[in-house]
Image (cartoon, rainbow, N blue to C red):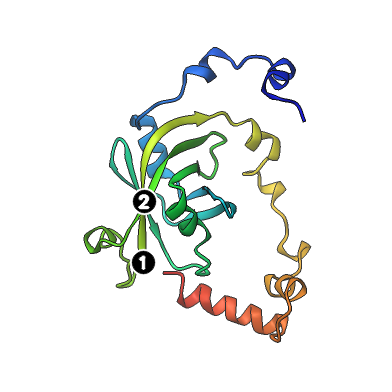
Amino acid sequence: MPDELELRDIYGPPMERARIKTLRRLDGHCRRFIELSPFLCLGTSSAAGNDVTPRGDRPGFVHILDDATLAIPDWPGNNRLDSLENIVENPNVGLLFLIPGVDESLRVNGEARISVDAGLLGRWEVNGKHPRSVLLVDVKEAFLHCGKALIRSKLWHADYKVDRSALPSYGQMLKDQIEIADTAEEIECSVAQAYREKLY
């Protein structure tokens, strides 16, 4: 595997604007990007391993408390708590914000802490329900990322959408991957019920 110097020889130096674009706080453009984003990927790590998890809701679900602090609600999931347990051990996180139809993305790196403060949880409410915890992220770095990856992938192109029938059902894939007594149909019914009744 090449070392850092060898990698630099292979790739060359970064463009000047790429090198200096890192912000230490959120500016107006970063704030607007976050306000419009319904989806982010959260990267965490610990001695046990690494994790990237999707987080999503209506645009603006990530609250900007100030120009250096973000609040991300933790709505019901699978209760594995991979990301949260990583953060307890190692607060360093990476966020990647996406906006459907926009090829550029926003990267935010920082330190996170978990809050169960009732006043903070009360900022979000759906059908009388509140998140179980909130992830507070102290922004250390923020910068816009060019759209090359999304352009190459044609992520937002309608003709690149995959018909769901190209894959087995989620229930069938789980049934094939793990030893469980439930049938694929039972798993699928359970998942569908959770989507209907336990989204929040």
Residue 132 is labelled as: 1
Furthest-left residue in this view: 119
Seen at 65% across and 44% down, the residue is 155
Residue under numbered circle 2:
113
Is disc 1 placed on a helix, strand or loop? loop
Hey, what amino acid is under mark 2? Arg
Furthest-bottom residue in this view: 181
Seen at 33% across and 71% down, the residue is 129
Hey, what amino acid is under mark 1? Arg
Horizontal side of 128 relative to 195 (left or right) equals left
- Above or below, 157 against 163 in this view is above
The C terminus sits in image quarter: bottom left
- Above or below, 23 against 110 in this view is above
- Above or below, 120 against 112 in this view is below
Q: Residues within 10 Å of mark 1 (few under 14, many from 20)?
A: some
Is disc 2 placed on a helix, strand or loop? strand
Q: Position of residue 81 (x, y in %)?
A: 49, 63
Is 81 or 27 nearer to us in this picture? 81
Horizontal side of 78 relative to 111 (left or right) equals right
Furthest-front residue in this view: 47
Mark 2 touches mark 1? (CB < 8 Å): no
Q: CA distance from mark 2 to mark 1?
A: 14 Å
Q: Position of residue 68 (x, y in %)?
A: 32, 36
